[in-house]
Amino acid sequence: MATRRLPRPSEVLPLIGSGDHGKSRLQRKLERCASISDVRELARKATPKAVFDYTDGGSMSESTLDRSRDAYRRVEFTPRVLRNVAEVDVSTSFLGQLNALPFAFAPTGFTRMMHHVGEPAVAAVAQKAGIAYGLSTLGTTSIEALATASPDVRRWFQLYVSRDRTQAEDLMRRARDNGYDSLILTVDTAVGGIRWREVRNGLTIPPHLTLNTLLDMSRHPRWWANVLTTEPLSFASLDSTGGTVGDLLTRVFDPGVTVEDIAWIRENWNGPIMVKGVQSLADSQILADLGVEAIVLSNHGGRQIDSGNVPLELLPGVVDAVGNQTEVYVDGGIMRGSDIVAALSFGATGTLVGRAYLYGLMAGGQDGVQRVLDILTKEIKVTMQLLGANSIDQLDRSMVRLRPY
Ligand SMILES: Cc1cc2nc3c(=O)[nH]c(=O)nc-3n(C[C@H](O)[C@H](O)[C@H](O)COP(=O)(O)O)c2cc1C
């Protein structure tokens, strides 16, 4: 029989409450998010429907998006055991520089719509973590302002080529002058994708005040207060507005861009070029032969062509064909750190992550992005340890396969 005694107050007091004194309600909510899917649900509650749908959605039936995510659910690992995984190094090299984690934050447009701070909140987290961040041509923070806000973040600039080529040349010059070391040329956007959610929600640039938006204000007062009391929402590198984002892409950017233009970009850009939005082995080969430093197998997160193919499925064949000529990155559908480990095991140099950090941004600004980074980091480390790999270069194809449909 155990002897019983009365507890002392000093033993009981520390047990009262959650133990997270000094943390805001938001930080506590974020800490209770176990996964990126949990953060996504917080994001849904924090933002108007049109904003959440803009970020979360894909083109038309969203089959490209769904299958890109589903592919990661078909991943099956073959763990190796009895290996020393006491220490695990998740750093790697992207385009000749150390990246502390095997992913970078992808360029995303209209970011201040998701949260009023926008790009600087994302860059601050990237800077602290030691990973690269791509600023979009459709960014809502200027090339210069982002460089000033996060001078030490590794910055990449994502270019959409405008019909007026001098505009694109000017953006490249400004990016170079402001310490952006690599150029991401996005090529899956000859015209804007058709996004049914945007049409149904009537999302336009800038957002219009309709009866629905006014109703929404009562449900998301904080989001609206932030939007209405900070710098008006606009594209920092464009002066064209009106219509949906898809309309804007079609109106402003040049559908006549071809591989011949890589030479023109080289004349205006003296750093590495990463071509993003490659969706076939044939184009991977052409670009590798042209000498681009990196390609990103990407379908724009399922926001452009519907019924498109799945980057993860293309990856092994592309790595086999051009992996010794150029770096091969992959994105689209990544929701867990284990998805990133799977891509690396199939031979990717690294991955980009888009929506995952945007969910964090919508849910809680910089704190939300930080939470997403922490979740992904932990999931990458634990997956690698359970897989028997203590560094990225130990991951290989013997450890992974895609189960057939
Ligand atoms: C809301 C949103 C906006 C985006 N805007 C851009 C953009 O301006 N330029 C670009 O190259 N890619 C853009 N992308 C695509 C991302 O760079 C990336 O390829 C994609 O998000 C990866 O898929 P994931 O969201 O499933 O991670 C955008 C994606 C989202 C979700």
Image (cartoon, rainbow, N blue to C red):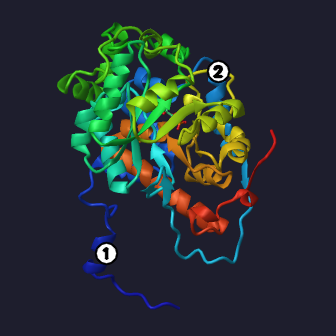
From where the camera sits, is residue 331 visible? Answer: no
Tell me the number on the disc at residue 12: 1
Element assignment for label 2: loop
The vertical placement of 62 against 321, above or below, is: above
Tell me the number on the disc at residue 242: none
Give the mark nearest the N terminus, 2 or 1.
1
Whether pointer 2 and pointer 1 mark residues with C-beta atoms closer than 8 Å, the reply is no
Q: Amino acid at mark 1?
A: Val
The residue that label 2 is drawn on is 306
Q: Quadrant of the C terminus?
A: top right
Q: Which of 158 and 299 lies nearest the eye of the viewer?
A: 158
From where the camera sits, is residue 78 visible? Answer: yes
Q: Amino acid at mark 2?
A: Asp
Give the foreground label among 2 and 1.
2
Residue at left offset 67%, top offset 43% = 322
Could you classify mark 2 by the number of other residues whose Cα lies within 10 Å: few (under 14), some (14-19), or many (20 or more)? Answer: some
Element assignment for label 1: helix
Residue 229: horizontal and vertical position, in percent? 18, 25
Residue 357 quadrant: top left
Question: Horizontally, is 95 left or right of 120 in the view?
Answer: right
The vertical placement of 157 against 48, above or below, is: below
Q: Which of 308 and 215 lies nearest the eye of the viewer?
A: 308
Residue 85: horizontal and vertical position, in percent? 59, 74
The vertical placement of 219 against 35, above or below, is: above
Residue at left offset 63%, top offset 37% = 289
Q: Is mark 2 within 8 Å of ligand 1?
A: no
Q: Which of 395 and 260 lies nearest the eye of the viewer?
A: 260
Residue 189: horizontal and vertical position, in percent? 53, 21
